Image (tube, rainbow, N blue to C red):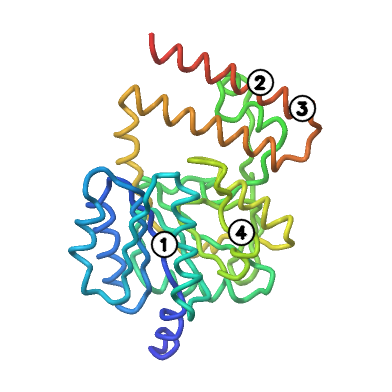
């Protein structure tokens, strides 16, 4: 790879990392990226942490001219927090044309992975979003968690619910078609790590801030489809997702209930505004989801 081409790509790209009470993980993530590249723009949004994360991260990277630390004045969730970073890039980093959304528990082992994603993304005019395959907690699962179909009516009703444990449903691909460039198209790609063309992302008004957590990628996939754009996976590149930290936090009952509530609220938001079913079906599904959440909360509190 020619260094000149690399520098051109790096200076025209930016990575958005959303932090909330996880400064150690975020600092490790930034350092890992800096081992890959000194020139990549890194925008860190601290989502109104309560553990002095902003001060800790700012102190360590204040002399890094390509790392920008932003303090959000409220924790409005994943979508709104990432949008703060995206709009900062839009207003302040004029050269940037490509953005990467990256959770702090994601590790990219080589800058080549990012460069190859960049090349693949810009190889097709209508391709708006691309991701890599993911090694999840040390394991590569197949069908992998990198891409899904749009939510079906059955999945909107049963996916993640108590009844769904009995009546199985899935939006995973049983097989994937891969073109000669190792690109596989998907309706939805994972939200923990993906690259997007900033102009097209802006065209659909970035993430929908009607959710706090969950379903962001499903909503984005639907927005891109409605705008006439595609999403895809570059199957010969890999990133690593260490999800153990979130799993540990969900051990606490209070955290479980909050997490579940976010999930059900986001699912209902998708049903109301992004599904293409009748209003009667929407109301029935949302009523069932409310009941399912109520039962789950009762079980946890027992």
For discs 2 and 4, the disc positioned in front in the rendered view? 4
Please report whichever mark, 2 or 1, sits nearer to the chain's N-terminal start: 1
Please report the residue visible at 38 percent of the width from the left and 73 percent of the height from the top: 41
Identify the disc placed on residue 16. Answer: 1
Mark found first going from the N terminus, 3 or 4: 4
Q: Give yes or no for contact between labels 1 and 3 (Cβ–Cβ under 8 Å).
A: no
Distance CA(mark 3)–CA(mark 4): 27 Å
Q: Residues within 10 Å of mark 1 (few under 14, many from 20)?
A: many
At which x and y percent is residue 6? 41, 84
Disc 2 crowd, CA 10 A, few/some/many (<14, 14-19, 20+): few
Find out whether the residues at labels 2 and 3 contact each other: C-beta distance under 8 Å.
no
- 72, above or below 33, in the image: above
Q: Badge 4: few (under 14), some or many (20 or more) residues near its Cα, within 10 Å? A: some
The numbered disc on residue 281 is 3
Q: Residue furthest top?
A: 302
User: In this image, 231 relative to 96: left or right?
Assistant: right
2 or 4: tag closer to the N-terminus: 4
Task: Give the secondary structure at mark 4.
Answer: loop
Q: Position of residue 224 (x, y in %)?
A: 67, 57
Measured along the vertical axis of the image, is residue 110 above or below residue 76?
below
Structural distance between the alpha carbons of marks 2 and 3: 10 Å
Where does label 4 land, which residue?
Answer: 205
Residue beneath the point at 79% across and 30% down = 279
Which badge, 4 or 1, comes first in the chain's sequence?
1
Q: Which residue is mark 2?
A: 287
Q: Quadrant of residue 102?
A: bottom left
Q: Nearer the viewer, residue 216 or 239?
A: 216
Query: Marks 1 and 2: in contact by CB < 8 Å?
Result: no
């Amino acid at each position: 790879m020619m260094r000149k081409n690399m520098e051109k790509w790096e200076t025209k790209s930016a990575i958005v990392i959303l932090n909330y009470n996880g400064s150690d993980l975020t600092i490790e993530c930034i350092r890992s990226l800096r081992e890959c590249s000194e020139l990549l723009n890194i925008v860190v949004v601290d989502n109104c942490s309560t553990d002095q994360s902003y001060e800790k991260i700012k102190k360590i990277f204040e002399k890094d001219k390509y790392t920008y630390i932003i303090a959000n004045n409220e924790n409005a969730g994943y979508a709104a927090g990432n949008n703060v970073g995206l709009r900062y890039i839009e207003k302040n980093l004029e050269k940037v044309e490509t953005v990467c959304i990256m959770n702090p528990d994601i590790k990219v082992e080589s800058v080549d992975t990012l460069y190859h994603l960049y090349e693949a993304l810009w190889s097709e005019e209508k391709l708006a979003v691309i991701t890599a395959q993911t090694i999840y907690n040390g394991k590569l699962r197949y069908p992998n968690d990198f891409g899904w179909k749009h939510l079906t009516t059955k999945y909107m009703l049963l996916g993640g619910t108590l009844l769904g444990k009995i009546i199985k449903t899935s939006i995973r691909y049983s097989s994937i078609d891969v073109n000669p460039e190792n690109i596989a198209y998907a309706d939805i790609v994972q939200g923990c790590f993906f690259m997007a063309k900033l102009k097209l992302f802006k065209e659909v008004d970035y993430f929908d801030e009607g959710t706090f957590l969950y379903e962001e990628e499903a909503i984005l996939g639907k927005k891109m489809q409605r705008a006439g754009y595609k999403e895809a996976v570059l199957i010969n590149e890999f990133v690593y997702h260490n999800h153990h930290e979130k799993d540990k936090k969900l051990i606490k009952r209070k955290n479980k209930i909050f997490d579940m509530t976010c999930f059900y609220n986001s699912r209902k938001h998708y049903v109301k505004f992004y599904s293409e079913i009748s209003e009667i079906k929407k109301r029935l599904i949302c009523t069932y989801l409310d009941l399912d959440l109520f039962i789950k909360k009762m079980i946890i509190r027992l």
